[in-house]
Amino acid sequence: MPPIDVNPRYNWTSQEIEALLKLPLLELVSQAHDVSRANTDSRGVQLASLMNIKTGGCAEDCAYCSQSAHHEALDVSRTPLSRVGEVVAAAKQAKELGTVRFCMGAAWREVTDGPDFEAVLEMVRAVRALDMEPCVTLGMLKPHQAKALKAAGLQSYNHNIDTSPEYYGQIITTRTLEDRLETLSIVRAEGIDLCTGVIIGLGESLTDRASALGVLAGMNPHPESVPINALVAIEGTPLEDQESLPALDFVRMIATARIVMPRSRIRLAAGRQRLSPEAQALCFLAGANSIFYGERLLTTPNAEPNQDQRLLAELGVGLPA
């Protein structure tokens, strides 16, 4: 394979991306590190916190998700939308721990106009007033709703594509990938940053992983933030018996995402708590420059903050300049 161009390009083919995923691991990580050094502050890792502001009862049937009304996941109860004061208190606590971005997630299929959406707008304004980056994940959006979120001060909208176009129907049947991409287009049109990534370990093939990254790498500009998630198998969901993902598969996805989207913020996301410190260090070397910080990611566990503080200190990694 010829040397990697460290500058962004938008015409990656799935075949090229799959070839990257198949490289010897150390060669892949080395190339990704070179791209990272040329395009990012390689010493800086952005800390993002995620708060579940409305739990359970989602009308989507995502096979991995404990919040779907179609599944009987254990230990997940429906809750109403959080109060604005609760969100502000959580955001202040996250900021004290060093968090820059505060993400708020509601288990909705799509946004509905009304009191709950107005409350979310107030949450966005309140988080922005704390001099933090507000991010929300609310499901599908209409243009006027995206406009309202932008006016409230929203920095970023999370809407993962999850998996490849070819494998999508095996994981979700209540929406299409095209639905997902339409919302991303609506968000982009309002000048809101895109936070959109993938989940690996769903039973997909290497070709599917390459195809999913190809969808993201084909966006111009690339998404500002790309979370790479590994399935956390939850009892009561269709994927409860899925085998755990090998740690080095996570490293390969991080490295390949960094190469094909050289200036995006590549976030080491769900599933990180199963990685050893050494595996996480490899992910940072391969170009990861953001993590979710805090003990929970919606309904799944995450690494404890004090563990993260020790690891980042040991690696000499701080906040981005």
Image (spheres, rainbow, N blue to C red):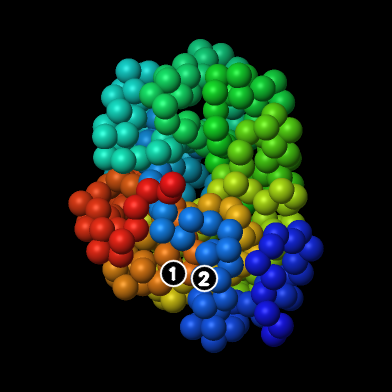
Contact flag, marks 1 and 2 (Cβ < 8 Å):
yes
Vertical placement of residue 16 versus 166, above or below: below
| Count of numbered circles in the view | 2
Question: Residue at 29% across / 68% down in the picture?
Answer: 277
Vertical placement of residue 63 versus 192, above or below: below
What residue does disc 1 label? Answer: 285
**Place of residue 183 in the rendered image (x, y in percent of width and height, measured from the top left):** 68, 37
**Place of residue 240 in the rendered image (x, y in percent of width and height, measured from the top left):** 40, 61
Between 303 and 265, the residue placed more toward the observer is 265
Question: Whole-Å distance between the Cαs marked 1 and 2?
Answer: 6 Å
Question: Residue at 44% across / 69% down in the picture?
Answer: 285
Check disc 1 and give the amino acid type. Leu
**Place of residue 168 in the rendered image (x, y in percent of width and height, measured from the top left):** 65, 58
Side of 281 relative to 225 (left or right): left
Element carrying mark 2: helix
What residue does disc 2 label? Answer: 33
